[in-house]
Amino acid sequence: MPQTVIIPTPLRKFTADTELVEVQGATIGEVFAQLEARYPGIQARLCEENGDLRRFINVYVDGEDIRFLDKLQTAVPERAEISIVPAIAGG
Amino acid sequence: MSFVKGLKCRECGTPYKLEPVAICEECFGPLEVDYDYDAIKTKLTREEISGRQKTMWRYRELLPLEGEPTVGLQTGCTPLVRAERLAKALGVGELYIKNDAVQHPTLSFKDRVVAVALSKAREFKFEAVGCASTGNLANSVAANAAAAGFPAFILIPDNLEKSKVTATQIYGANVVPVKGNYDDVNRLCSEIAGRHPIAFVNVNLRPFYGEGSKTFGYEIAEQLGWKAPDAVVVPMAGGSLITKIYKAFGELQKLGLIEEQATRFYGAQAAGCNPIAAAVKAGTRDIRPVKPNTIAKSLAIGNPADGYFATGVITNTGGWSEDVTDAEIIAAMKLLAETEGIFTETAGGTTVAVTKKLIEQGRLTAKDRIVIAITGNGLKTQEALTLEDLKSIEPKLSAFENAAGIARAAKAAA
């Protein structure tokens, strides 16, 4: 069963303004690789050159921050919703 | 006229046009407003500012509007209170409370950021506004939107204090409690802002919104006679305010309005949500997110967006960050109320309690001129307090004199 990635506004120029992209990957790392295969250049916006997630990006699998899980090795269940969210101000 | 050149990424410096965008497309860093300080310097003098109305708009050249403000015209210029009784209780000398617990119109410093953000929303021709909020921002967006005629969409965690929810609903806003914490609410708002034309003040208008906080710093310096203090103690949730006060003092210095300043910045958090304090103590700028669990709900942001910059300000100025328990927060709320007659919310209790701790650690001393940032009002978080149950007496003099505690207090006062 595919998973859905919600593409944030700053990345939609890579996806021709598509907001929801279906992928199938066992981990977030695999999901990112699939995004990169389909939308070349997108991975460099998500990750530093050393492969780590960029400082100002948060990635959630069904609402759980992957920094609390296994970071890029975090497992992605079937039908999961993956959110890529820029860090946001207080309130 | 405007002194804004555009937006630029705070992390990688990429320039952007003046639009309702908040995030760098290159590196996801936050965008910030870029000003023409040389032009501002020719216009803005101490005399010019002093002659203006006592509102935050007396510093309008340093705020990111193209035209005149249209929302929150009466906001700003809250009292800077010399706190002699609190200073004595804590064992320091010159201590001040910057008291935004009496901010107009909703009794927190958020009225400053909302005044800028909603004025900007109007300039950008948005027809609806909104926010993700831990409470104070919800109150302020709802009130200011009502006064400005905007429909408002307010998303809050569903465990907020009842009084903060009531003080949002009363203005007729669309209040949406979300099952989860502030970080969940934030994520959802970001996704809504990507699909709907709503000016979320702390999402798509974040670069403009944050600038309003600088007026808190400008006012402190002006009220101290155009001097920055030796130390400020600031509550931290997302970590923005402390960086904006730092920016404010820096700008005043750049414009020649204050002399060179060497203010040390101290950040206050609750032990139940201390990602920034923990990073400072660990000697790193990398924030490890936490799941919040504290009565200081207005500070309960587990993944602070400006944490990286806040730790930078704190360590680069020779400051420090501490966190305190819920019991210490309550005790400090009482201490501030009993010594200075100022009833602050749990966030203010956190700031006062951390100040006490910093003094005990010798980081703040009797030689320092210290300002404590009080950012919200205690009437909004009364649920956090359980005070002594009171017993009624008969309306008779003997009953008053026989009521044990009262009689002792009356005798002591005589």
Image (tube, coloured by chain):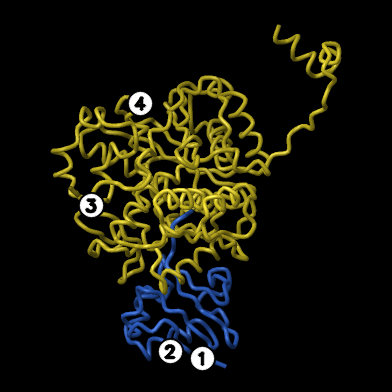
* Same subunit, tags 1 and 4: no
- The reply, left or right, for residue B31 in relation to residue B284 is left
Residue kind at label 1, given as amino acid type: Gln
* Same subunit, tags 4 and 2: no
The residue pinned by badge 2 equals A34
At 44% across and 61% down in the image, what residue appears? A88
Label 4 CA crowd tier, 10 Å (few <14, some 14–19, many 20+): some
Residue kind at label 2, given as amino acid type: Gln
**In the rendered structure, are the residues bearing label 4 and label 2 in contact, judged by CB atoms less than 8 Å apart?**
no
Q: What letter labels the chain drawn in yellow?
A: B
The residue pinned by badge 4 equals B224
**In the rendered structure, are the residues bearing label 1 and label 3 in contact, judged by CB atoms less than 8 Å apart?**
no
The residue pinned by badge 1 equals A24
Q: Residue furthest bottom?
A: A1
Q: Measured along the vertical axis of the image, is residue A70 above or below residue B325?
A: below
Spatial CA span between label 1 and label 2:
8 Å
Q: Residue B305's image quarter? A: bottom left
- Give the structural element (helix, strand or loop) at label 2: helix
The chain containing the residue under callout 4 comes to B
Q: What letter labels the chain drawn in blue?
A: A
**Residue B124, image x, y percentages:** 29, 61
Spatial CA span between label 4 and label 3:
30 Å
* Same subunit, tags 3 and 2: no
Label 2 CA crowd tier, 10 Å (few <14, some 14–19, many 20+): some
At 55% across and 38% down in the image, what residue appears? B377
